[in-house]
Amino acid sequence: MFSDKDVERLVLEFLKTQGMCVLATCSGNVPRASAVEFFPEGTTLYVLTEGGQKVANILANPCVSVAIHTQFTGWDRIRGLQITGTAEIGKPGSKVFDEGAEAYKKRRGLKGVTIPDFMNIVKITPTRIEYLDTRLKAQGLGVRHLLEYKQALAPQIP
C-alpha cells in the first residue's frame, strides 16, 4: 500500500509529463468540458484563457473537475487522474494571475513572460485527486489511489 506521500509523488511526476487536460465546469445545469493546456505548480493547476463560457461558468459555480490521461496503448498501461476542486479567475494584476504567469514561465523554461491584458488565468485547487495507473498491478500494487485535501474555502472573485 502506498502512503499519501507516495501517491502525491506519482501524481506530481505524472503532471510533469502531461500538458493538456479537460476542464469541466457547470452553470445552470449546463455542463461544459474544455480541452485546455495547463501549467502545474505542485498539484495546483493554472490555465490561460481569453474567457468564454468556462470562465462564466466558474464565476457562477467555482466547483470544477479536471481529467488528464495518457493515450490508450493497452489495458496494462492506462494512466490518468481525475481532479475535483475549486477554481478561481485571476485578472491581470491579481495574485492568481501572477502565480499563473510564473507557472507558465517555469513550465515553458522562459526567463520572462508578458501575458496580454485580455487574458485570464484560472487557478484550480484540488480537494480530491484520483490517480489510476494499471502498470502498478505488475508490482503487486493497487491501481487506484486517492488523495483528499481539506475542503478549500470558496474562492474570492476579484
Image (cartoon, rainbow, N blue to C red):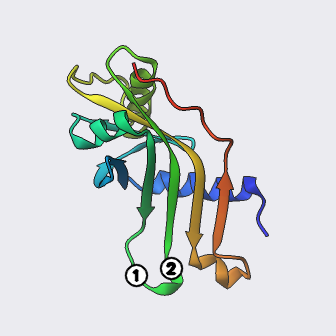
- Tell me the residue at 62%/59% (across/down): 10
Residue at the extreme top of the image, as rendered: 93
**In the rendered structure, which amino acid carries the disc numbered 2?**
Arg
Residue 43: x and y in percent read: 56, 45
Number of residues whose C-alpha sits closer than 10 Å to that of mark 1, classed few (under 14), some (14–19) or many (20 or more): few
The one of 109 and 73 positioned closer to us in this rendering: 73
Element at label 1: loop
Gap between marks 2 and 1, in whole Å? 7 Å
Q: Residue at x 63, y 71 (%)?
A: 144
Residue 146 seen from this side: yes
Residue 136, quarter of picture = bottom right
| Residue 5 vertical position relative to residue 108 in the rendered view, above or below | below
Quadrant including the N terminus = bottom right
Q: As displayed, is residue 146 above or below residue 151? A: below
In this rendering, the count of numbered labels is 2
Check contact, mark 2 vs mark 1: CB within 8 A. yes
Q: Is residue 36 left or right of residue 127?
A: left
The answer to which quarter of the image holds residue 146 is: bottom right
> Which residue is under mark 2?
77
Q: Position of residue 21 (x, y in %)?
A: 37, 55
Which numbered disc covers residue 73? 1
- How far across and how far down the image is residue 114, in percent? 27, 21
- Residue 67 % position (x, y): 43, 59
Mark 2 is surrounded, within 10 Å at the Cα level, by few (under 14), some (14 to 19) or many (20 or more) other residues, namely some
Kind of residue sitting beneath label 1: Thr
Q: Quadrant of the C terminus?
A: top left
Residue at horizontal 74 percent and vertical 52 percent from the top = 5
Point 26% across, 24% down: residue: 115
